[in-house]
Each structure stands twice: as C-alpha cells, then as structure tokens.
Amino acid sequence: MPSNYLMAVDAGTGSVRAVIFDTNGNQIGCVQKEWKHREDPRYPGSMDFDWSVNWELTCSCIREVIAQTGIKPAEIAALSSTCMREGIILYDAAGKEIWACANVDARAGDEVAQLKQIDPGLEKELYLESGQTFALGALPRLLWVKNKLPDVYSKIARIGMFNDWIIYKLSSVLAVEPSNGSTTGLFDLKTRTWDSNIARRCGLRDDIFPEVKECGTVVAQVSKAGAAETGLAEGTPLVSGGGDCQLGAAGVGVVDAGQAVVFGGSFWQYEYNTGVAGCSPQCDVRVNCHAVGKLWQYEAIAFFPGLVMRWFRDAFCAEEKRLAAEKGVDPYTIMDKAAAAVPAGCYGMICAFSDVMNYINWKHASPAFMNFELNPEKYNKVTFYRAIIENTALVTLGHVQLVERVTGNRPEKIVFAGGASKSWLWSQILADVLNIPVDVPAVKEATALGAAIMAGKGIGLYPDIREAARKLVKIEKTFTPNKENRNVYEDAYKQWKAAYAPQLKLSDDKTTRYMWAAPGL
C-alpha cells in the first residue's frame, strides 16, 4: 500500500493535537484536545505535567484523526513530533516517568538564588556557552528536585523534552534533538549536544543525558504496544522533531541565515536565523539551535500579547462578541474594523505590558494604560484595543533592534505567523512599525507542518529541509509599510520606552506588582 501521508503530533502549552498532511503539505485532518498543567499548592509557581492523563489525550488525538480522515494507518509514511519548549520530563532506570514540569514553571526561585551564590558570574558564563540564562532553563528546576525531592532526584536515569517523550511512548526509544534540547541550558551551542561540565558546575549529576539525534533523523519505529494504544501501524518510522518555534520556522520557510519570523500567539517570539553559534555579550537575548543543522536562532520573547488581547475582548467587548455570534465571524474581525478608523499612534496613548527582552534580568512592569484623556470620542474601548496592537508591534521593533545590535543585521522582510497573523490590522501595523514588508503564509498550522517536513526528511521523501520548506510553504499576502505612519511610530516608540522605565521602577520598588518576573528576581 502506498504511503502518501505524514503525521505531526504537537504537544502545546494548552493542548495536544495530531495533524495529518499529504506529501504536498496540504492539511488533511486535525484533532485537538485541551489539557491543563496544574499548580501544586505546596509549591507556588509550579506547573506540573500530568504524563498519565496527557498520554491518554495524545493517543485519543491520534486514533481520532485516523478515523476522521479515513486514512489507513499503513498509509502514514512517518510521524514526527513538536512541543512547547523548556518543559522537561525525568525517567527512572526502568524507563518510567517520575517527575515533569511544563514550560513556564516558576517554582525554583530559591534555586536561582542558590546558583547565583555559588558564583555571581556563573549565569553569564553559562549563557555564553549555552545561549540560556536561569530564567527558563532546566538547571534551577533540576536543582529544585535535588533540594526538595531528594528521593526522586536519586532515581533519575534520563532527562528529556516533551516532543521526545511522544516518540519514546510510541517506541520505548529516547533520544533528544538539539532545537528543544538546547533550551535546557545544558547544551553546548557550537557542538549542538549535551555539555556535562555545565551540570557539574551547578552541582548537578552529569550522567542523565540520553543520545542526541539531529532533527529530521529516524529515531525508532512504532512498537507493538504503541500501535495498540494509538491505532498507528507497527513499524511506522518515528522521526526526531523539534521545539515549536524552530519547527514553526521551518513550516513558514524561514530556513536560511538572515531570515526572520514573528510568531504571534499567547507569547510573541521574534526569531532571527544565523549561521554562527554566538551570543550577546550583554546576555540580553536568547540563542537556540535551529531545527536546521548548522543554523541557530536569536530569539526575543514578548510576554502575553495574545492573553492580553483575550482578556480585553472578554472583559470589555461583550457587544462585539454578541454581534460576531450573530454574523458567524470572529469577534476580532469586528474589533479590527472599528480600530482601523483610529489614527496611528492612538492619540498618544501608551500601554505598559511586556518590556523589550533582557534575558539575564527579565521582568515586566505592572500592566498599565497611560496618557489618555477623559474624552470618550477619542479614548474609548476601540482606541484601547488598537493601543494594545500597536504596543505589541513596538515591543517587536525593540526586539528587532536588540538582535540587530548583536548581529549587525536586520532582515529585509519578516514572516508573520500564528493566531495574530489572521488579523489584517495587526499585520499592517507590524509592517508600519518595523518599516519592512511582512509576509503572512497561507498555512495556519506552521508548527505541525514543520514537524511533517521533518518526518518526510527522515524517510528520504524530502532530500533537504530547506528544499522541502521552499516547495511546500506558500505566502498568502504581503503587507507593505505605510510610510505616512512611520514617523508617528518612531516617535511612539521613543515615548513608550521613556514611559516604561518609571513603570518598571515602581514594580522594582514593590509599589506595583510585576506582570511577570523570572524566578529569583
């Protein structure tokens, strides 16, 4: 029977999904299940990953998408996986899961302080080798397990990421790939593999690291047990995937040095590709391995733009939601249409949400709207809505400039993907603020498509990841900058930066609460 399809399994922050593509990159079917990562009440800031329940959800997604599409399991040529980054899972010598946490788990504040006491310069030294600070990496979390759960720590035999866990559960073979593995802070950027010396310098064990397989490499085949649980055909090749942003970059064709993409979701990530495994001397921007070999990514992250917009919609836009339900459209479509009539710059109004990234001292001021007047004709919910959109674009401009200071390069254009890219207004404002063209791809499942590309690469269907991406990725629309708005946004960016600094100081002084701060700050 010919194998004409590829499957991607995506373990995201809020859900897991199984997606089937044909070999031309067309999505054939998708089944998604929401999941939650609960806080353990004993440990504030914790974000536990329930591997038992979540594996059942994963299996049901796979079974249901096969049933939904009517595709025979033997027609699926290969499977690859992707996931939220930074989440880790620990296994004992028998291969059983014994501890796991999701991506923004923040329980290890005491351990960050402990690491800094070991050597105040240690974080910077490790960043220059790994591209990671203590803000999101595995080092403080492993130290937390050592300090708080010594019985669990003594039983650790292997550490892995969630995309590797999916392949492991299907095959009993564990191998970590560099795009997500590098987010642990335990990888050497240049060699793209584990650096045991980093663990030793942090007082951690150095004997828990599984084999590393580059993205797009066949790791194993679906076992008899894996087939029974999921409905997949026994023997189906399983291919190493990668982190969501890195595979998303492949899924939108950002696979060469000098290219860049912005992913607009709950978080906004700006990814800039480079052929050099270097870091910023100021330790202010993250550096990860790309899913494409011999390629790395400078990454700057804006916190919560998608969540801020959802909060605003649900708190203040009940009428727009009602109208949207009547017309069968997205509420954001109605809100965008109204906000398009507000002039660029929102009459000088300023938002304070996410700051420009400072990876080694990462914190965000208490949310605020500033510089508006008690004039309902100008300053109403439509203006506030547009101000949120403009503010996110201004933070992205700060991230583009941040990476430019490190690399000396600015991209000639940017690909814009993720949920926010569905908004023509957000796409246009991003182009206006950055003053460069913005390409919006046709595919809306970029991360899953990236995993499918890896699956095809692993079995030789696509000889090269770059070639496959160029073939399969199609740009739906290009937004060109409105030059009349450029001066407005240049002034708005300077104004926003000047206004944000005292807002952050208020949070530093504990007068207001941080929107978010890295553990240990």
Image (spheres, helix red, strand yellow):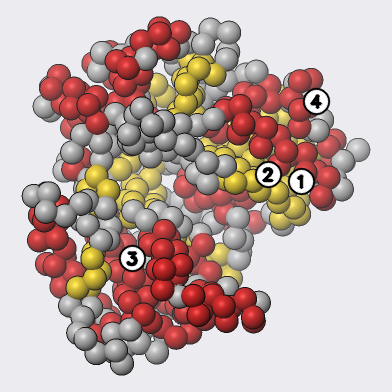
Among the 4 quarters of the image, the one containing residue 302: bottom left
Amino acid type at mark 3: Thr
Distance from disc 1 to disc 4, alpha carbons, whole Å, reads 15 Å
Q: Secondary structure at mark 1?
A: helix
Q: Residues within 10 Å of mark 2 (few under 14, many from 20)?
A: many
For marks 4 and 2 on the same chain, the one whose residue lies earlier in the sequence: 2
**Residue identifier under label 2:** 18
Q: Are marks 1 and 4 in contact (CB under 8 Å)?
A: no
Residue 198 x %, y %: 28, 19
Q: Which mark is residue 292?
A: none
Q: Which mark is residue 228?
A: 4
Residue 95 showing in the rendered view: yes
Q: Are marks 4 and 2 in contact (CB under 8 Å)?
A: no
Q: Secondary structure at mark 3?
A: helix
Q: Nearer the viewer, residue 167 or 464?
A: 167
The quarter of the image holding the C terminus is top left
Q: Residues within 10 Å of mark 1 (few under 14, many from 20)?
A: many
For marks 4 and 3 on the same chain, the one whose residue lies earlier in the sequence: 4
Amino acid type at mark 1: Val
For marks 3 and 2 on the same chain, the one whose residue lies earlier in the sequence: 2
